[in-house]
Amino acid sequence: MDIFDKCEVNMGPIGMYAKQSEGYYVFPKLEGEISDKMIFMGKERLVWSLNNYLGLANHPEVRKADADAAKAWGLAYPMGARMMSGHTKYHEELEHQLAAFVGRPAAYLLNYGYQGMVSIINALVNRNDVIVYDSEAHACIIDGMRLHFGKRFVYPHNDMQNMEKELQRATRIIENTGGGILLITEGVYGMAGDLGNLPEIVALKEKYKFRILIDDAHGFGTMGPTGAGTDEHFGVQDKVDIYFGTFAKSMAGIGAFVAGDSKVINYLKYNMRSQIFAKSLPMPMVIGAMKRLELLRGDPSHREKLWTIVNALQKGLRDAGFNIGKTASPVTPVILSGTIPEATQITYDLRENYDIFCSIVAYPVVPKGTILLRLIPTAVHTLEDVEYTIKAFSEVKRKLENNEYSKEFKIGN
Ligand SMILES: Cc1ncc(COP(=O)(O)O)c(C=O)c1O
């Protein structure tokens, strides 16, 4: 058998639908300025799919900082990995600012959140250690664990009783191996918008010896009184050992960071393989991130605008009878019952007849029979956008309940 044979016969769980869905349901092209309205297939649509939470993507100061940095340095500088030749005082300065903002002694930049997380996990644990993690962990956490030679125990999403059981199991194992326990949770779960149960997780530290790593990709910039994240929101920053945030969402950029005790961050700096053996973040990303951070922490109006839209959207949906689950963050899931063909037709109807572009999640990401339409409100949405969307969703829900979507499988081009 040729190694490439599978490429046509087994395209994988998403790729198997590529012919029907590419360009529309997957790999769509959103064009124009990043905002509440963008162009999809030549037509303006109201977009609820971008994690541009604070609306910084097109902030004039951000655009200027990015452009000025590109003009001054280009995209090449600095060349090489940080350890070899790609280190600058600006990288260090951004790290100091990030550490101070999230209330930790030290921080280290990561050139992508995904690779960074893989290497944080890989560097922190060895075969004697045990990882305890949530069943809804992001793919980057799962990939980090795939490199782990020791035991790993999963608990059902946010299920504290089972988490404690897994901690007990893990404790028995490390008593023999002499290792330690790393518990990994997310701050905000990106699909359903609910929060990792940090208060109860940190309380378990009284009973068990373990360290906590939090992936706060969606919480950084959106949660907490100053936007410093979900652990700030819960007032437990001093009990969460390692904080991970990305620039890909609230910061509307590229890159990420990890923050914690100086000794741990210094160890990670010398041991995260995806950072040691990969090129450093180019200067516009670093200078641009400093500008974003300045706006994120210095101007609460972005977060206030975001939460005005979040509250209006979530209250409006609840009042209109929608199930939006347990979200306590800007991520807004609209949970409906239906099949995959119905889910695709709803997406099509929303896009073509209401000019609303949102992401849809169906089985196997959510249980069979469940359709999750995921809305990401941002500071650049308006209350009119919210009102229009709730009306459209109410009509779509009525059609779904009247079985109007179950007739045929439509595709949009
Ligand atoms: C929970 C979570 N962790 C990590 C990442 C990866 O971050 P990045 O896009 O910076 O690679 C994402 C997605 O962006 C995410 O949603």
Image (tube, rainbow, N blue to C red):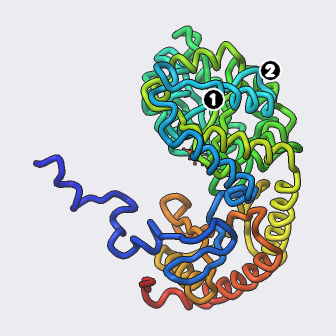
Which residue is labeled 2 in the image?
206
Of marks 1 and 2, the one in the foreground: 1
Q: Is residue 405 above or below residue 199?
A: below
Q: Which residue is mark 1?
A: 91
Label 1 – label 2 distance at C-alpha:
37 Å
Amino acid bearing label 2: Glu
Query: How many other residues sit within 10 Å of disc 2, few (<14), some (14-19) or many (≥20)?
Result: few
Q: Is residue 366 left or right of residue 198?
A: left
Q: Which residue sits at x=47%, y=38%?
A: 76
Q: Is residue 82 above or below residue 34?
A: above
| Residue, far front | 72
Q: Does residue 329 appear left or right of residue 127 in this picture?
A: right
Residue at image x 55%, y 27%?
Answer: 120
Task: Identify which residue is drawn at 75% across, 80% down.
Answer: 390
Q: Secondary structure at mark 2?
A: helix
Mark 1 is on which residue type? His
Residue placed most toward the observer, 37 or 191:
37
Q: Is residue 135 in view from this perspective?
A: no
